[in-house]
Image: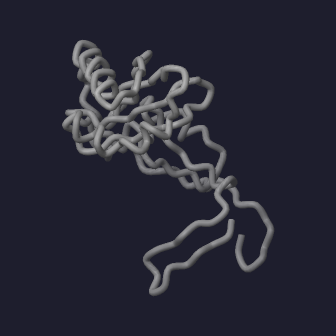
Amino acid sequence: MRNGDSRPLHKPTTPLPSLDLLTPPPSEVEPVDTFALEQMARLVEARLADFRIKADVVNYSPGPVITRFELNLAPGVKAARISNLSRDLARSLSTVAVRVVEVIPGKPYVGLELPNKKRQTVYLREVLDNAKFRDNPSPLTVVLGKDIAGEPVLPIWRKCRTCWLRGLPVPVNLSV
């Protein structure tokens, strides 16, 4: 839309450059070390117990950069207690940071996200060469990377209230 014009944008008809121009991801995918994840789950439980928080790791979801551990808290334990201890917990787990997800949608657990010891490289080609991106009807489709499940992250611009544009002499805030 331009200057108050309310006509909808149409998807461009010009073909995109070939994905062959981008570096392909390696054909061998490094397997997930389930033994190391189980050890880390037990260590998380032990460190939480050191802070007098009773919790069981019921599941974990390894992603390209972080692993989310799902914690089943004992009755009476508030998620805010874990949030307040995030820095101390990171130190005791010998990691850079810990992110506490107090509500995991659709689950009764608290999430604890820890950075992976070895990060996976997310290749632009593998994210662009995905049906979620190719089949998106929006003419403004962009990819931001991968989520914890390894799925491409595409912002839904219709749901964004404002957008900041950089590169101009003064940052511009657009209402969408």
Q: Among all residues in the image, which is located at the extreme top?
A: 35
Tell me if 27 is positioned left or right of 54 in this view. left
Q: Which of 100 and 80 is in front in this view?
A: 80
Tell me if 169 is positioned left or right of 50 in this view. right
Q: Residue at x 71, y 69 (%)?
A: 1
Vertical position of residue 144 compared to residue 166: above or below: above
Residue 118 seen in the figure: no
Q: Residue 161: percent from the left, percent from the top?
A: 67, 62
Q: Residue 155: percent from the left, percent from the top?
A: 56, 49
Vertical position of residue 52 compared to residue 141: above or below: above
Q: Residue at x 41, y 17 (%)?
A: 56
Q: In which quarter of the image is the C terminus?
A: bottom right
Q: In which quarter of the image is residue 75?
A: top right
Q: Residue at x 23, y 22 (%)?
A: 30
Number of numbered discs? 0
Q: In which quarter of the image is residue 132?
A: top right
Vertical position of residue 171 compared to residue 163: above or below: below
Q: Residue 121: percent from the left, percent from the top?
A: 27, 39
Q: Which residue is drawn at 51% across and 72% down?
A: 165
Q: Among all residues in the image, which is located at the extreme right?
A: 6
Q: Residue 64: percent from the left, percent from the top?
A: 33, 33
The way the protein has been coloured in the rendering is one colour
Q: Which of 40 and 56 is in front in this view?
A: 56
Residue 105 seen in the figure: yes
Tell me if 153 is positioned left or right of 87 in this view. right
Q: Among all residues in the image, which is located at the extreme bottom?
A: 169
